[in-house]
Image (cartoon, grey):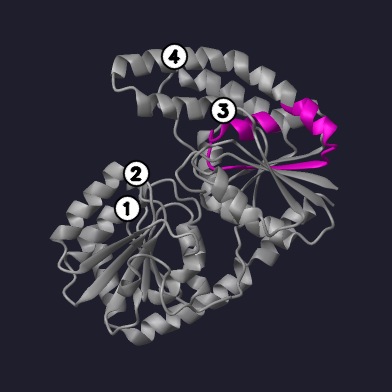
């Protein structure tokens, strides 16, 4: 079969969706030709190609033209006047009404020319990426029966009354165009059922990663590599996007209340304004706080951490950081938002605390800091849970079953 995997990326670095796509491509057991289609974003083009160069069965294709959402981001970046921004966005909205049908028809013709037999459109959230929606509708026009939409994150809520009719039409068109809609956790499924207009039952397929640890580096390949040298100081770490929804400011506020000497490691890139806020908070913290920026290979970070914290406040349907930490036998503290509490077992593989609560997060961190036996036990239990429930082999089997 000739399969098409689709994803849209708009951030500074490829998201967790691309981690899942790589696992799917790398571990796909059937002898299929896989095409990976992504938008031509100048921010992520080289990184996307780098991630998939070693997978022979996968050919990376990039959309040759910019999508409206990318143009909208450029408007925000280039123009300071709020009135001009609104005018240009309204103009862009009308352009999209004409642009979308043309692109959908072009994509349908392209799918026919490539003789595509099946589509897995991996959408970051809902409504998420335009390319993800367009390819699903194009797949229906091209009469591709195995046409699947995968939604990786909790949907954005409809905020204004006039958005509801359009949301209803959009959701029903996409729902009618695909064979099944899949999501990554029961929490995300419930949120989609509540906040969307799909007329299909949703299927849950949990994410998975490769469980084999390929290396155990002595230091990270980074300009601040000295900070991750082995020492007796416990290291509390966050790995992921620097975004307010990730709650990293809650972690720093909690660490400011922790008395035992620690080091805080924050690995990731993202919103520059938010990073300034985090830097300001780090100066008030009694512990050393190190910012590693974006690390291409997270396997260079996790071995050096003693506790991994994911204090997300919103849009966290699964929590890839949790299973990555499990891979390296690290105990995890996460908030009770979204699908994270499905992945982590409270008091077994880590601790679940109330979201946006500095004091409770501080108590959880201190509990693990002061109990080495608990940290080790939770790390081992997490590793077992990863192997049983969130390994890439299990995930790939579920996706392959869709085509047979």
Which residue is rendered at x = 22% and y = 54% of the image?
279
Instruction: Compare marks 1 and 2 and give the one earlier in the sequence.
Output: 1
- The stretch in magenta equals 107-135
* Res. 197 visible in picture: no
* Res. 109 visible in picture: yes
Instruction: Compare marks 2 and 3 and give the one earlier in the sequence.
Output: 3
The residue indicated by pointer 2 is 271
Which residue is rendered at x = 79% and y = 62% of the image?
29
Q: CA distance from mark 1 to mark 4?
A: 32 Å
Instruction: Compare marks 4 and 3 and give the one earlier in the sequence.
Output: 3
Which residue is rendered at x = 76% and y = 32% of the image?
139
Mark 3, Cα crowd under 10 Å, few <14 / some 14-19 / many 20+, is few
Whether the magenta-drawn stretch holds residue 120 is answered as yes
C-beta proximity under 8 Å, tags 4 and 3: no
The residue indicated by pointer 4 is 90
C-beta proximity under 8 Å, tags 1 and 4: no
Percent across and percent down for residue 369 are 28, 78
Percent across and percent down for residue 389 are 61, 68
Q: Could you tell whether 354 is left or right of 200 in the image?
A: left
Q: Which mark is residue 66?
A: 3
């Amino acid at each position: 079969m000739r399969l098409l995997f689709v994803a849209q990326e708009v951030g500074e670095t490829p998201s967790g969706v691309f981690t899942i796509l790589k696992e799917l491509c790398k571990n796909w057991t059937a002898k299929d030709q896989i095409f990976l289609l992504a938008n031509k974003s100048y921010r992520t083009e080289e990184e996307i190609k780098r991630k998939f160069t070693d997978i022979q069965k996968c050919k990376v294709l990039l959309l040759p033209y910019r999508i409206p959402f990318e143009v909208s981001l450029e408007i925000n970046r280039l123009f300071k006047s709020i009135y001009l921004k609104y005018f240009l966005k309204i103009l862009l909205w009308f352009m999209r009404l004409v642009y979308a049908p043309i692109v959908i028809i072009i994509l349908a013709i392209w799918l026919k020319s490539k003789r595509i037999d099946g589509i897995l459109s991996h959408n970051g959230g809902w409504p998420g990426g335009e390319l993800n929606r367009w390819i699903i509708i194009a797949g229906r026009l091209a009469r591709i029966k195995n046409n699947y939409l995968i939604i990786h994150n909790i949907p954005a809520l409809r905020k204004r009354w006039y958005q509801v009719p359009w949301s209803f039409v959009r959701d029903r068109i996409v729902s009618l165009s695909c064979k099944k809609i899949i999501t990554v956790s029961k929490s995300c499924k419930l949120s989609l059922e509540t906040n969307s207009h799909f007329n299909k039952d949703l299927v849950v397929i949990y994410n998975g990663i490769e469980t084999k640890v390929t290396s155990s580096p002595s230091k990270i390949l980074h300009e601040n590599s000295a900070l991750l040298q082995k020492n007796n100081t416990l290291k509390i770490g966050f790995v992921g996007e620097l975004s307010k929804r990730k709650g990293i400011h809650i972690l720093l506020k909690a660490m400011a209340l922790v008395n035992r000497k620690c080091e805080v490691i924050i690995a990731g890139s993202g919103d520059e304004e938010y990073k300034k806020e985090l830097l300001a908070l780090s100066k008030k913290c009694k512990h050393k706080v190190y910012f590693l920026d974006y690390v291409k290979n997270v396997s260079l970070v996790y071995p050096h951490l003693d506790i991994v914290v994911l204090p997300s406040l919103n849009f966290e349907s699964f929590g890839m950081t949790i299973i990555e930490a499990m891979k390296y036998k690290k105990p995890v503290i996460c908030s009770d938002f979204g699908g994270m509490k499905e992945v982590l077992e409270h008091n077994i593989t880590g601790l679940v605390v109330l979201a946006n609560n500095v004091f409770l997060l501080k108590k959880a961190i201190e509990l693990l800091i002061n109990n080495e036996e608990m940290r080790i036990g939770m790390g081992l239990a997490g590793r077992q849970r990863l192997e049983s429930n969130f390994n890439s082999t299990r995930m790939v089997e579920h996706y392959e079953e869709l085509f047979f």
